[in-house]
Amino acid sequence: MYEQEKINPYSASGEKSEQVESMFDHIAPSYDKLNHRLSWNIDKGWRKRAVRQLEALHPETVLDIATGTGDFAILTARMLHPRSVTGADISEGMMEVGRRKVSAEGLSSTIHFQREDCLHLSFGDNTFDAVTSAFGIRNFSDLEQGLREMCRVLRPGGQASILELSHPVTFPMKQLFSIYSHTFLPLYGRLISHDSRAYSYLTATIEAFPQGETMVGVFKRAGFSDATFKRLTFGICTMYLAIK
């Protein structure tokens, strides 16, 4: 069991997945504003780099896991022009925001949303050319099971392009990020989202989540034949590419 799997948003007892669903339903109206402001809009550039990893693959069918409000799905549709993008998430509140954004972008014929337990996806084996996820796998109650499901629904030769927040490991960013994540991030998150625990949970899971070479090993144990990683913005974010 990985350390972040033991961390719940609200209570040490009870199902993590239920608490994560409740948390994201609650913060959904303010999520986009907070996400962009807390990263100084750098998260938009991270997503573009992750989508570019899939350009040579020319995927026709893409699954966006833990799609949230659909930013990654929208960007994928705009940049790669696949036939279809399926956004899967446990939070209907987040996806409802995403559906409105997709409609406003005129992409409703390409992108659709579906409520899914990401540890037990309803899709058949070898269904998608590519799987994406941005800042979502850290919330899995069973990380390897979630990655096994991603691998299962990928076609042979398919690729997973994944972004996850990480803790910088070099001076002085390690120290600066620690101060930022323990003070400003939870305070500002609480003021905007009116959820006293959500952004403290965010900080705790970033620190507990496996990173870099360790995470590459997790991908391989989950069934991927190869995986690589690249740290972005001094290690605040890590980008992974895994191949089935």
Image (cartoon, rainbow, N blue to C red):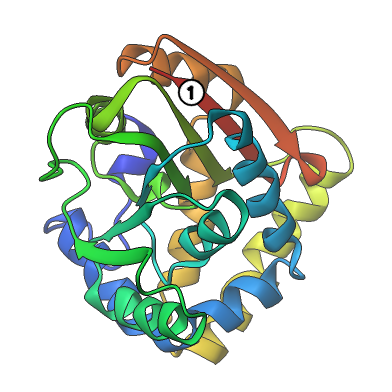
Of residues 193 and 149, the one nearer the viewer is: 149
In the image, what residue type sits under mark 1? Ala
Please give left or right for residue 62 compared with residue 163 in the image.
Answer: left
Please tell me whether residue 52 is drawn above or below residue 187 in the rendered image: above
Quadrant housing the N terminus: top left
Please give left or right for residue 6 compared with residue 158 in the image.
Answer: left
Please give left or right for residue 54 compared with residue 6 in the image.
Answer: right
Total of numbered circles in the picture?
1
List x then y, in percent, for residue 159: 45, 27
Please tell me whether residue 71 is drawn above or below residue 170 in the rendered image: below
List x then y, in percent, for residue 145: 22, 30
| Secondary structure type for disc 1 | strand
- Residue at (62, 82) in percent of width and height: 188
On the image, numbered disc 1 is attached to which residue? Answer: 242
Any part of residue 1 in sight: no
Q: Quadrant of residue 3?
A: top left
Neighbourhood count class around disc 1 (C-alpha, 10 Å): few under 14, some 14–19, many 20 upward? many
Quadrant housing the C terminus: top left
Q: Quadrant of residue 119?
A: top left
List x then y, in percent, for residue 226: 48, 11
List x then y, in percent, for residue 162: 51, 39
Q: Residue furthest right?
A: 172
Of residues 145 and 103, the one nearer the viewer is: 103
Please give left or right for residue 177 compared with residue 85 in the image.
Answer: right
- Residue at (26, 36) in percent of width and height: 146
